[in-house]
Amino acid sequence: MEDNLIQLTVIDRDGTENRIDVPTDINVSLMEILKASEYDILATCGGMALCATCHIEVVEGIENLSEASDQELDMLDTLPDADEQSRLACQLRLHPNNNGMKIRLKGSLQ
Amino acid sequence: MTNTDICIIGAGPVGLFAVFEAGLLKMRCHLIDVLPQVGGQLSEIYPHKPIYDIPGYPSITAQELIDNQLEQIKPFAPTFTLGERVEQIEKQDDGSFIISTGDNTKVHSQVIVIAGGLGCFEPRKPEIHNLHLYEGKGVDYMVKDPAKYKNKRIVIAGGGDSALDWTYHLADIAQQVTLIHRSDSFRGAPDSAEKVFKLAQEGKINLLLSHNLSNIHGNGTLTAIETVNKEKETTAVEADYFIPLYGLTPKLGPIADWGLNIDKNAIEVNTFDYSTNVERIYAIGDINTYPGKLKLILCGYHEAALMCQSAFKFVYPDQKLSFKYTTVNGINTF
């Protein structure tokens, strides 16, 4: 595998698991990558941590993500279904050490 | 009743620029926005953030851009209704519309342009299967009048600032306050969390941490809130009122009920002129969607310009539109 290409496992809302290849050198958020991979995510606010429709649960590999900003934590705190593994995909930029990360989509579709 | 050519719903950067483009074609505009000031999310959410992709400005703060846009549209004397949400539109026999707000302001307009950005922010609801049955019958999504809860048993749910603050304030007013939070800690607002922990230690409130909402009990009106913990044990807390405080989330609001084609919370438009499926209603900026849509302010400006060329035929059905550059023609004020 090329240095800048990593693999993620994405668990969709219906439980189906798929692996996607993600380049880490294109400076886009995980939310944008998921949308580009045609996952159903509203991303109403366009990546400003305002709507939380890109809420994900990081099933494996959360320790390799950068820490959440206060703004992201504030938003996660307001969600009824967030837990310690929750993040907002729009706030995540992936790096080579995120290879093998496993996530589950949780964001609202309404 | 205000009479206008174009009624623009949303006074953000794209709505404001539509006033300019409309003005060049001698069309008057009235803008309505749910926020108490113009500027949309630029003024409300990130006024001091720099924007780098406005042509001609290597960097400009969001508020400066809005201030400049207001200056730019001054010659066209737009009118405003601020702090009110558009609730209803009624089509008239001649094709025009009467637009009504929640505060009963009425505007008569030939054309409606929806430039509503993210939509309006509404309370986020927790997923409890029978929650909707008790809305207005014991379930409140915001605290409007604290006196309503005097001597009542209140359950608040949530872990953000407003859940903590209202728990603290209502502890003095209500007979009993229970705060339910899914986690065992509060990550934000350490001061507010400390106050709430102190109240719990003193026995002045009940704190149910690491509990998730699972059910609502009642017989027409609310009687208890059921929670479940990590060990799958359920607890029922008797209550007169349940106040879930899970922040706000952007929604289309009443616009969703106007018969427009909607895809994923956005209004579908024809990229020829940014018209919707309803004649005389256009949608521009972040609130619309079409193949290749980019949510950028500058794309919204482009959409505003093309929309005005198309709206002209409804405002001046007997006139032929002649396109003129501002460099040739200048700006002819109203």
Image (cartoon, coloured by chain):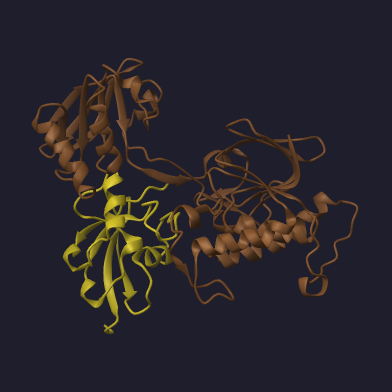
On the image, which quarter does residue A92 sit in? Answer: bottom left
Write the residue at 32% across / 73% down.
A21
The answer to whether residue B61 is left or right of residue B104 is left
Q: Pinpoint residue A55: horizontal percent, then vertical percent.
A: 32, 54
On the image, which quarter does residue A26 sit in? Answer: bottom left
Question: How many numbered discs sit on the rendered protein?
Answer: 0
Camera sees residue B286: yes
Q: Pinpoint residue A4: horizontal percent, then vertical percent.
A: 29, 81
Tell me the quadrant of the picture where the C terminus of chain B can be found. bottom right
Camera sees residue B271: no
Front residue (pair A74, A102): A74
On the image, which quarter does residue B226 sit in? Answer: top left
Front residue (pair B97, B146): B146
Seen in the picture, residue B210 relative to A76 is either above or below; the reply is above
The yellow-coloured chain is labelled: A
Q: Residue furthest right?
A: B318
> In the figure, what tint was chain B given?
brown
Tell me the quadrant of the picture where the N terminus of chain B can be found. top right
Q: Pinpoint residue A78: horizontal percent, then vertical percent.
A: 30, 45
Write the residue at 59% across / 66% down.
B299
The answer to whether residue B210 is left or right of residue A1 is left
Q: Pinpoint residue A101: horizontal percent, then vertical percent.
A: 22, 66
Write the residue at 78% across / 65% down.
B331
Front residue (pair B126, B49): B49
Front residue (pair B332, A19): B332
The answer to whether residue B326 is left or right of residue B51 is right
Seen in the picture, residue B149 relative to B99 is either above or below; the reply is above
